[in-house]
Image (spheres, rainbow, N blue to C red):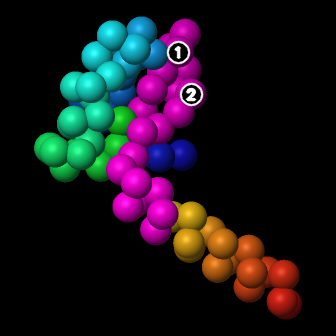
């Protein structure tokens, strides 16, 4: 399981109220990730588009390698 620091977790309510600020913390302030919690359970993670695309490419490559084995 991935560990999250307190400043990397935001409630869904706070995210809805402060979406622009949360997004800016990722895009402009270099925060790697922002975990979104609802009912005290982590539900989603906000990351920048470049990181998402890098992860998706790596995942697709691994899936392809598994298929050709």
Q: Which mark is residue 68?
A: none
**Is residue 20 visible to us here?**
yes
Q: Is residue 44 magenta?
A: yes
> Looking at the rendering, which quadrant does residue 69 occupy?
bottom right
Q: In the current view of this chain or complex, which residue is farthest to the bottom?
A: 69
Residue 68, given in percent of the width and then of the height, sits at 84, 89
Q: Is residue 65 above or below residue 27?
A: below
Residue 21, given in percent of the width and then of the height, sits at 22, 25
Q: Is residue 44 above or below residue 29?
A: above
Residue at horizontal 40%, vertical 54%? Answer: 49
Q: Secondary structure at mark 2?
A: strand
The reply, left or right, for residue 25 in relation to residue 64 is left
Other residues around mark 1 within 10 Å, as few (<14) / some (14–19) / many (≥20): few
Q: Is residue 30 magenta?
A: no
Q: Secondary structure at mark 1?
A: strand
Residue 58, given in percent of the width and then of the height, sits at 56, 73
The reply, left or right, for residue 63 in relation to residue 29 is right
The residue beneath circle 1 is 38
| Residue extent of the magenta highlight | 35-54
Residue at horizontal 56%, vertical 64%? Answer: 56
Q: In the current view of this chain or complex, which residue is farthest to the left?
A: 29
CA separation, marks 2 and 1? 6 Å
Residue 5, given in percent of the width and then of the height, sits at 30, 35
The residue beneath circle 2 is 43
The reply, left or right, for residue 3 in relation to residue 60 is left
- Are the residues tagged 2 and 1 within 8 Å (C-beta)? yes
**Is residue 6 visible to us here?**
no
Other residues around mark 2 within 10 Å, as few (<14) / some (14–19) / many (≥20): few
The reply, left or right, for residue 47 in relation to residue 23 is right
Residue at horizontal 45%, vertical 26%? Answer: 36
Q: Earlier in the sequence, mark 2 or mark 1?
A: 1
Q: Is residue 62 above or below residue 2?
A: below
């Amino acid at each position: 399981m991935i560990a999250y620091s307190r400043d990397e977790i935001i409630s869904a309510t706070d995210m809805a109220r402060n979406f622009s600020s949360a997004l800016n913390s990722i895009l402009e302030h270099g925060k790697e990730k922002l975990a979104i919690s609802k009912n005290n359970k982590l539900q989603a993670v906000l990351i920048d588009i470049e990181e998402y695309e890098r992860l998706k490419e790596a995942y697709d490559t691994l899936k392809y390698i598994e298929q050709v084995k």
